[in-house]
Image: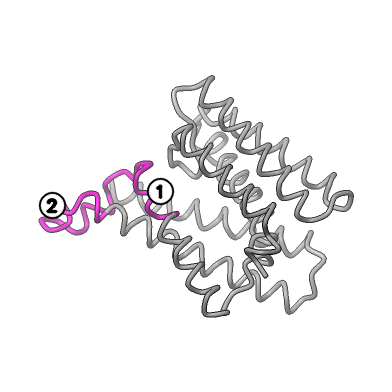
Amino acid sequence: MAYTAILTNIGILILSILAGLFSFYLISDLPKEEKKKQAEEITSQLINFILFIWLGKIILHLPIFIQDPLAVLAYPSNSHALYLGLLFTSLAIAYKKYKQKIEVSSFILSFVPVFLVASFVYEFIEVVWRDNFYHWKYLTLLLILLGAYLILHNRLSKWKLIWVTLTGWIAGQLLLSYLMPYTTAFGYTMAPWFLILFYIASSSLIFFRKKVFK
């Protein structure tokens, strides 16, 4: 049963990401070749992120991994595994940028709409198909953010739009963490301190992007 649940969750995650990539192709005004390049980069980094989360699970549950490696996959991923996954992914992207193998600014600008749509599809499946009505508040937040993104897409500069979306997402998540015992993204819980730290770091990168992403 545990492995069936794992495969189901992976299937939902893949479907959500595919929906996000498809929406990126529809709304992006980039040339076709650039869309393909960014879609491939996003897919690559998302795969790395998932693998890094599993690596984090192995590190956090090393004794279990030594005794039964497959049991680690069945073990529920917690916020600490997510934090390690984000840290390792950030380091991998930073190294790739150092080697001049990735345009970080283009990647971020392309990733945001993929994340929003993928998150919405994931939460929609949770609420409608899996009857997990605990997620409806986050689903509502994502619907608002998606609507705002589409409305402001051609009215704000890309970086302003990214910052507004980031601010709305963080503010919404902090509100949800106050209204509910915990808040999630793709099934992973996130502590308020992490959301605040992530917002400060992301906002700093956005405001100093000319130096960071040159």
Asked if one can make out residue 55 in the rendered structure from this viewpoint, the answer is yes
Amino acid type shown at disc 1: Leu
| Residue 177 is inside the magenta segment | no
Q: Percent position (x, y) of residue 125?
A: 55, 42
In the depicted view, which residue is nearer to us: 119 or 97? Answer: 97
Residue shown at the point (43%, 37%) measured from the top left: 189
Q: Which residue in the protein does label 1 denote?
A: 82
Secondary structure found at label 1: helix
Q: Amino acid at mark 2?
A: Pro
Which corner quadrant holds the N terminus?
Answer: top left
Viewed as shown, does residue 5 lie left or right of 106? left
Residue 78 lies within the magenta run = yes
Q: Quadrant of residue 127?
A: top right
Task: Tell me the residue at 85%/50% (across/down).
Answer: 156
Q: Which residue is at a point 57% across and 79% down the rendered structure image? A: 100
Asked if residue 1 shows in the view, the reply is no
* Residue identifier under label 2: 63
Total numbered labels: 2
**In this rendering, would 145 be left or right of 67?**
right
Label 2 and label 1: CA atoms lie apart by 19 Å
Circles 2, 1 touching at the beta carbon (< 8 Å): no
First to last magenta residue range: 58-86
Q: Tag 2, which secondary structure?
A: helix
In-front residue for pair 193/176 = 193
Neighbour class for label 2 at 10 Å: few (<14), some, many (≥20)?
Answer: few
Q: Is residue 97 above or below residue 91?
A: below
Image quadrant containing the C terminus:
bottom right
Q: How is the image coloured?
A: one colour
Residue 17 coordinates in the image, percent (x, y): 57, 57
